[in-house]
Image: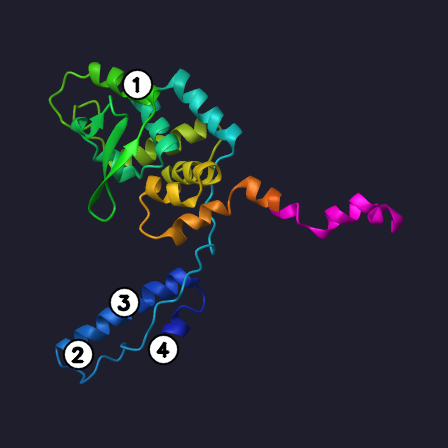
Amino acid sequence: MKSYAEKRSATGGPKLKKAIVWSLRKFGKHLALLQVLEEDPARNLRHPTFHPRAELPEYLSEQELHRLLEYAAHNLNVRDFIILSLFSTTGLRPNEIATCRRSDLLPKQGILSVHVKGGWTKETPVSETMSALLMRYLATRHDKCNALFVNKRGRSISVDWLQRMVKTTGKKVGLTLTCNHLRHTFATYAAERSGKVITKALMGHQHLATTEVYTHLSPHYFKSCMMLHPYRKATKKGAFHEHR
């Protein structure tokens, strides 16, 4: 089984190997359950270990984010502008925004109660400006739907629609954009300003190792690393110029 898994995933990456191992383990348990085989042949297979920094998430620069929100403020309707702003300032996932209800917004407390991955509720802080925008948008609504955001038919928006809207808006400002880019953008700058522990809570991560990826994405992190480079000390002493 192990050699078969290695052979099948030889032309792919760790994700392909993980999928193959998962399938073989399920199939092995099934064969053992039906007693086709005495033992599960895949019982010793292990999923490949992913290093938390194996694939660094992409994020927008401050200039790109400003360009996106500036365009949205002047060219999109209030609903779409608020959604893009929520992605950028809270780091919410698409399904979390799509499933938000009117009753989840507590404007006086500056909180949006969000049902997050894992089946629990997270109190997400929102600014006074964002609360005011949300209340302004809700005041224009005449439907009876309890969803925080609705489509033209007065029904809850879908995750697919969210992803299309973000992608389309990104194209209009010259960006290849996804919902994850906006979430990662928030996480990167939150980690830079507030540290990984607070960012973990804001992002709704279960493990600190997931959040630590973003602390290593910060431009300031790389800048501080370069300050330790021996070249910097050498240039201060004039060593670099002496050996040119």
**What label sits on residue 133 in the rendered view?**
1
Residue 92 in the image: above or below residue 196 = above
The residue beneath circle 3 is 23
Q: Residue at x 59, y 45 (%)?
A: 222
**Crowd rating for badge 3 (residues with CA inside 10 Å; few <14, some 14–19, many 20+):** few
Tag 1 secondary structure: helix
- The kind of residue on which mark 3 rests is Ser
The span from disc 2 to disc 1 (Cα, nearest Å) is: 58 Å
The disc, 3 or 2, on the residue closer to the chain's N-terminal end is 3
Kind of element beneath mark 4: helix
Q: Which mark is residue 32?
A: 2
Compare marks 4 and 1 and give the one earlier in the sequence: 4
Span of residues in magenta:
225-244
Asked if the magenta segment contains residue 237, the reply would be: yes
**Mark whose residue sits in front, 4 or 1:** 1
Identify the residue under disc 4: 2
Label 4 crowd (10 A; few <14 / some 14-19 / many >=20): some
Taking the spot 43% from the left edge, 56% from the top edge, the residue there is 52
The x and y percentages for residue 149 are 23, 26
User: Toward which corner of the image does residue 101 lie, by quadrant?
Assistant: top left
Q: Secondary structure at mark 2?
A: helix
Answer whether residue 4 is visible to the viewer in this image. yes
Q: Residues within 10 Å of mark 2 (few under 14, many from 20)?
A: some
